[in-house]
């Protein structure tokens, strides 16, 4: 794929031009995901319609480019054999493909920097999708940790790795040079040591387990976007990886899931929250693709938002929806500590997170994102191919960059 900015000329005659549907962000996203899905052709996208300000054009150009890449993304399974002699990080650009489409962003105002930023963000999202799409035999705890370490080296940032109680925790640090508090990006990945016959026997009914590493993969991409753009925020990525053996996480055939792994993820989250606060984080944002409570309630397209500060949760929801990523704020109140057991079972996610918030220190703000639904595109559509979707990466990056000014974080 090639995306280029071109200055508008009144005398030029354009063919195959595209007018963005500015009236609705969801409609705009569908329009350009579908266009990207074609993966071929030459298209001119006119930005000088709708009476938009220069800043708004910049924002929408980045949305358009992200959607073009999301639609065009294709996981290249035929490149998996390269992983026998090279690392996942070294192969990541060859493990995905965006087709041969050519797109010209046409405007009378200079949008070159917005095009460059949009392309960098879209490629980072593609890398997260590739990690999520890797088959179990090509990715495990140590390979994921190695990927994070190689990414940190390429960005020129410090990286620490420790293994305790069967959990590998990798921490990446980006320091902007300010003494203000840090933002912690928390992600978890669970890998399954499943025998080959058992894996194939349950693959169709339980294919969602393939994507239980999306939380850490997506947060790694958020970190890469922010550190790569030299953000003015201090960023810490706390990523936890573990493996659950098939005999440890017994298959629950009725519910089609590995129950032990889901319980283990809560302990991993609590440990990561404590680690982040010990390193000076005053904002915690964690993304989970492991729990299915929100998906059962709201379907495959909405991210659940839980926050210990209602205003913060609402601001994140507004940011996400402005980028075409639906999100909905859910309750996280102390009342869930007092519910009788029958009610706890019905509201188990809010109950668990209500107790988890007790880990927070005074003044620390926390956002928990349940993206088990939108983190995976469960079938090929007009807009995206089946597999990991990279949902909420752009929203988290935009929220940290724009909604957390330095003086607000002190």
Image (tube, rainbow, N blue to C red):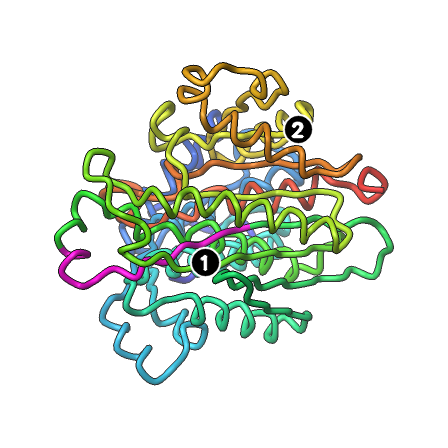
Residue 268 at least partly seen: yes
User: From the viewer's perspective, is residue 83 above or below residue 285?
Assistant: below
Q: Position of residue 376 (x, y in %)?
A: 34, 44
Residue 18 at least partly seen: no
Q: Nearer the viewer, residue 408 or 3?
A: 408
Q: In which quarter of the image is the N terminus?
A: bottom left
Disc 2 is placed on an element classified as loop
Residue identifier under label 1: 3
Q: Position of residue 344 (x, y in %)?
A: 46, 20
Relative to residue 129, is residue 223 drawn left or right?
right
- The residue under the point 56% across, 62% down is 169
Q: In which quarter of the image is the C terminus?
A: top right
User: From the viewer's perspective, is residue 275 above or below residue 398?
Assistant: below
Q: Residue 334 carries which label?
A: none
Relative to residue 258, is residue 158 drawn left or right?
right
Are there few (<14), some (14-19), or many (20+) residues within 10 Å of tag 2? some
Q: Nearer the viewer, residue 251 or 179?
A: 251
Residue identifier under label 2: 308
Q: Position of residue 117 (x, y in %)?
A: 59, 56
Residue furthest out toward the bottom: 85
Residue 68 is covered by the magenta coloring: no
User: From the viewer's perspective, is residue 22 above or below residue 174?
Assistant: above
User: From the viewer's perspective, is residue 376 above or below residue 297?
Assistant: below
User: Disc 1 versus disc 2: distance between alpha carbons?
Assistant: 41 Å
Q: Over which residues does the magenta segment extend?
A: 187-200
**Quarter-of-image position of residue 28:** top left
Q: Nearer the viewer, residue 187 or 194?
A: 194
Are there few (<14), some (14-19), or many (20+) residues within 10 Å of tag 1? many
Q: Where is residue 16 in the image (x, y as percent from the top left)?
A: 33, 47
First-in-chain label (1 vs 2): 1
- The residue under the point 59% across, 41% down is 59
């Amino acid at each position: 794929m090639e995306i280029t900015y071109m200055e508008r000329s009144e005398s030029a005659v354009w063919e195959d031009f595209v007018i963005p549907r500015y009236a609705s962000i969801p409609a705009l996203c569908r329009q350009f995901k579908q266009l990207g899905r074609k993966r071929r052709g030459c298209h001119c996208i006119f930005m000088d319609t709708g009476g938009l300000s220069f800043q708004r054009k910049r924002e929408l150009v980045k949305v358009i480019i992200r959607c073009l890449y999301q639609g065009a993304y294709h996981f290249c399974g035929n490149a998996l054999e390269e992983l026998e002699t090279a690392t996942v990080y070294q192969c990541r650009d060859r493990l995905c493909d965006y087709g041969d489409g050519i797109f010209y962003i046409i405007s009378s105002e200079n949008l070159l920097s917005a095009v460059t930023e949009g392309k960098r963000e879209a490629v980072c999202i593609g890398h997260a999708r590739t990690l999520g799409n890797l088959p179990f035999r090509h990715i495990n705890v140590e390979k994921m940790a190695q990927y994070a370490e190689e990414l940190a080296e390429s960005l020129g940032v410090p990286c620490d790795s420790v293994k305790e109680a069967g959990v590998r925790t990798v921490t990446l640090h980006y320091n902007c040079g300010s003494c203000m508090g840090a933002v912690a990006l928390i992600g978890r990945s669970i890998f399954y040591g499943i025998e080959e016959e058992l894996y194939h026997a349950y693959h169709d009914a339980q294919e969602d387990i393939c994507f239980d590493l999306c939380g850490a993969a997506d947060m790694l991409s958020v970190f890469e976007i922010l550190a790569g753009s030299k953000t003015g925020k201090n960023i810490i990525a706390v990523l936890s990886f573990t493996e659950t053996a098939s005999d440890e996480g017994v298959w629950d055939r009725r519910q089609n899931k590995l129950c032990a792994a889901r319980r283990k993820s809560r302990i991993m989250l609590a440990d990561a929250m404590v680690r982040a606060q010990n390193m000076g984080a005053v904002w915690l944002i964690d993304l989970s693709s492991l729990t299915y409570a929100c998906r059962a309630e709201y379907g495959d397209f909405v991210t659940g938002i839980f926050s210990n500060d209602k205003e913060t949760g609402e601001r994140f929801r507004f940011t996400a929806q402005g980028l075409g990523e639906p999100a909905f704020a859910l309750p996280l109140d102390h009342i869930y500590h007092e519910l009788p057991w029958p009610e706890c079972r019905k509201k188990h996610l809010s109950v668990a997170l209500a107790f988890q918030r007790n880990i927070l220190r005074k003044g620390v703000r926390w956002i928990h994102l349940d993206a088990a639904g939108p983190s995976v595109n469960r079938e090929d559509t007009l807009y995206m191919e089946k597999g990991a979707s990279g949902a909420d990466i752009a929203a988290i990056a935009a929220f940290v960059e724009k909604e957390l000014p330095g003086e607000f974080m002190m």
